[in-house]
């Protein structure tokens, strides 16, 4: 009986295994292969060495992502707090409103934002109607960051909201009992106890921000080259596959490092809460 | 008695339209050890939370030294709480948990260090400074919770079933310890429990609650010796509660006989409830007894026997130091001062007959256990 069951279990895992091999492990191996070979297929470190000329792109990308993540946290945390404190029916409504954009394609959302911000867009029409000077936003760094915030904010709010709903109200009462006013309770108890949600949120916003290419292309008006854009461009021609793979590899390492760092905090805190 | 520190005036509280507290009137004095005692769900925690500021009463006033504090938030009240399940901060170690209140009040770190050390010593937690609450046993967490509250030198300490999660031995030790801390600090303790033994052994004043109302307020001996109604008589210790009539002062009639007693002040032939404690009935030969009956059950309890005696259909519980054989005919002798007469109340007839007495009786009187409605009526009827 037990043996049959475990056979079935193993059989059930096969599709997943095939999927993983074909679409995750396979591409990874390709990336590794291209990153360490030249056009003739010979092993080389040249691609990696060549990356130093892309240093400024990495730097700009990291800056944009950090700023976008920081804004998401600043907006997302109070939003999650307000949501968690609303009455249950309001909470459900807010949750749906928050998730609704996530069901719409990222490309469509970014495109809509572009038409809103465009010179002939809604915002500028309004400004003109009020007799104010137009504000050329598309093509500025601000628009790119705004796009990242707009697209990825729900990924910050949701994990924080979840950890807030898990937060036992008794801790807040204990804090008030010991003399915390609401503000002190927020900083001394709520914030540390929802840290796992914060770290998850940071990871979930930082990772897509640093790898995005669409947002910077559309809202940056081609003025900003981020890692994602560079990789995309390299993969448009077979001759530059190798350098593209090398950049991808470094970006992956960057993402793995950030997930490892923030994920570790998230896990450790979670453990502390559960135990 | 010392000055009144906290005064509750006709407090009403409802949750979702359900009345949880009705007209609670209570005075709590400085340095007093007051216990709120009653079965689960009777409103003890809610009363405590109103005093702590975690709930606002719908009606009535909460006064602290004569000032209305209904709307004062918890952090502005000189009151600290030991919560039912401790609620220690999981992200802080023992030291930081205990220092939490002092840090908020901007006490210098050196002073905090000394005071925390003293407090940990007093509560037997030396050496645990760097442990996280999750790594402590229930008893240790309990002590941290007490230390964390006491270090702020509150005027009042609220304790909500603080020993509920501990095993019997530890409970007894902690009871003594809390008593010692109460005496040493002179802080007013308001203690919630459903354990009548705990309430009687620790308190200066016991407040017996049932169904959102205060049934009786008094010293442990008053509550035990002079229960005001059948509920209190049954909840505190074991009692035989009989239907009776007060023929005139100091003459009570019950179980088909007229007895001399020491109570008076009732109307002529007023129906009353009679309480007789199991240890106050003497077992004598049939011919010397005021009542006689058949022994239907004998349980050895260590230093005494608990016997059930059928007297004309009503089963009495009696504690006796001499062995009595089952099915024996015995006489019962009751001294006049062992007969306690109470006015009839809404609880009359609901308690105090041991005719269905069995082990099950024990767990239904345990307020932590849920009993379904029909089960309860069959067992009690
Ligand atoms: N926040 C609340 N919401 C709804 N009902 C509550 C709430 N707190 C307590 N109650 C109800 O009030 C009654 C009294 O509760 P409580 O004061 O906790 O009793 P006790 O501490 O004596 O067991 C119970 O029936 C309980 O279900
Ligand atoms: Mg309670």
Image (spheres, rainbow, N blue to C red):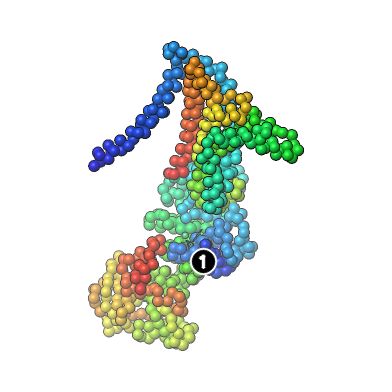
Q: Is residue B236 visible?
A: yes
Q: Is residue B311 above or below residue A40?
A: below
Residue B303 location in percent, x, y?
31, 66
Residue at 49 percent of width and 15 percent of height? A239
Camera-side residue of B282 and A121: A121
Residue at 40 percent of width and 26 percent of height? A25
Q: Is residue B204 visible?
A: no
Camera-side residue of B150 and A184: A184
Give the residue at the far right of this rendering: A131
Q: Is residue A147 above or below residue B116?
A: above
Chain ID, mark 1: B
Residue at 46 percent of width and 37 percent of height? A267
Quadrant into which the C terminus of chain B falls: bottom left
Residue at 50 percent of width and 18 percent of height? A237
Q: Which residue is mark 1?
A: B19
Instruction: Classify mark 1: residues with Cα within 10 Å, few (<14), some (14-19) or many (20+).
Output: few
Residue A219 location in percent, x, y?
61, 30
Asked whether mark 1 and ligand 1 are closer than 8 Å, the reply comes as: no
Q: Specify the quadrant of the image occupied by residue A138.
A: top right
Camera-side residue of B293 and A55: A55
Q: Is residue A144 above or below residue B11?
A: above
Residue B316 location in percent, x, y?
33, 75
| Number of on-image labels | 1
Q: Specify the quadrant of the image occupied by residue A41.
A: top left
Q: Specify the quadrant of the image occupied by residue B31.
A: bottom right
Give left or right: position of B65 versus B355: right
Label 1 sits on a secondary structure element that is: strand
Quadrant into which the N terminus of chain B falls: bottom right
Residue A69 location in percent, x, y?
57, 34
């Amino acid at each position: 009986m037990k043996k049959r069951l475990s056979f079935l279990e193993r059989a059930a895992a096969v599709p997943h295994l095939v999927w993983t091999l074909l679409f995750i492990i396979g591409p990874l191996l390709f990336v590794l292969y291209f990153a360490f070979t030249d056009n003739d297929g010979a092993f080389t470190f040249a691609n990696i060495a060549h990356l130093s000329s892309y240093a400024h792109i990495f730097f700009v990308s990291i800056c944009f992502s950090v700023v976008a993540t920081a804004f998401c946290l600043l907006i997302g945390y109070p939003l999650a707090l307000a949501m968690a404190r609303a009455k249950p029916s309001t909470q459900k409504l807010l949750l749906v409103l928050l998730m609704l954009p996530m069901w719409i394609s990222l490309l469509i959302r970014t495109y809509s934002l572009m038409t809103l911000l465009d010179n002939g867009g809604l915002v500028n029409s309004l400004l003109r109607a009020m007799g104010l000077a137009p504000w050329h936003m598309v093509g500025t760094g601000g628009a790119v960051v705004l796009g990242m915030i707009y697209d990825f904010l729900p990924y910050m709010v949701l994990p924080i909201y979840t950890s807030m709903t898990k937060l036992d109200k008794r801790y807040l009462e204990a804090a008030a009992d010991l003399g915390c006013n609401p503000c002190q309770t927020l900083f001394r108890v709520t914030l540390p106890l929802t840290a796992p949600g914060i770290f998850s949120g940071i990871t979930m916003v930082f990772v897509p921000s640093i790898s995005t290419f669409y947002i910077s292309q559309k809202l940056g008006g081609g003025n900003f080259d981020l890692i994602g854009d560079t990789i995309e461009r390299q993969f448009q021609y077979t001759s530059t596959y190798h350098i593209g793979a090398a950049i991808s590899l470094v970006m992956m390492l960057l993402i793995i490092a950030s997930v490892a760092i923030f994920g570790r905090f998230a896990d450790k805190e979670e453990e502390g809460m559960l135990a | 008695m010392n000055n009144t520190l906290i005064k509750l005036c006709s407090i009403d509280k409802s949750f979702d339209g359900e009345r949880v507290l009705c007209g609670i009137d209570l005075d709590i004095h400085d340095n007093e050890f007051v216990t709120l005692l009653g079965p689960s769900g009777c409103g003890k925690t809610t009363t405590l939370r109103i005093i702590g500021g975690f709930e606002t009463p719908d009606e009535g006033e909460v006064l602290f030294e004569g000032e209305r504090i209904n709307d004062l938030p918890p952090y502005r009240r000189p009151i600290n709480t030991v919560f039912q399940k401790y609620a220690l901060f999981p992200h802080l170690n023992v030291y930081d948990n205990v220092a939490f209140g002092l840090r908020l009040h901007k006490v210098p770190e050196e002073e905090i260090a000394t005071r925390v050390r003293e407090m940990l010593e007093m509560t037997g937690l030396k050496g645990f400074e760097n442990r996280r609450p999750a790594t402590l046993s229930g008893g240790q967490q309990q002590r941290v919770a007490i230390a964390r509250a006491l270090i702020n030198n509150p005027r009042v300490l609220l304790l909500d079933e603080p020993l509920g999660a501990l095993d019997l031995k530890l409970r007894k030790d902690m009871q003594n310890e809390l008593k010692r801390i109460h005496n040493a600090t002179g802080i007013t303790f308001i203690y919630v429990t459903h354990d009548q033994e705990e309430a009687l052994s620790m308190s200066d004043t016991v407040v017996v609650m049932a169904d959102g109302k205060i049934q009786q307020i008094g010293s442990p001996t008053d509550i035990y010796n002079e229960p005001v109604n059948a509920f209190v008589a049954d909840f505190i210790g074991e009692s035989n509660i009989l239907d009776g009539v007060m023929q005139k002062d100091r003459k009570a009639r019950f179980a088909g006989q007229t007895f001399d007693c020491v109570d008076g002040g009732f109307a002529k032939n007023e129906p009353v409830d009679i309480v007789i404690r199991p240890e106050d009935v003497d077992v004598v030969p049939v011919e010397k007894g005021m009542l006689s009956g058949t022994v239907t059950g004998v349980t050895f309890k260590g230093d005494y026997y608990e016997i059930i005696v059928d007297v004309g259909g009503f089963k009495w519980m009696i504690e006796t130091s001499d062995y009595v054989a089952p099915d024996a005919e015995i006489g019962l002798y009751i001294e006049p001062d062992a007969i306690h007469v109470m006015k009839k109340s809404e609880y009359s007839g609901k308690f105090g007959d041991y005719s269905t007495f069995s082990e099950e009786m024990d767990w239904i009187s345990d307020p932590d256990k849920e009993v379904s409605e029909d089960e309860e009526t069959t067992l009690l009827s």
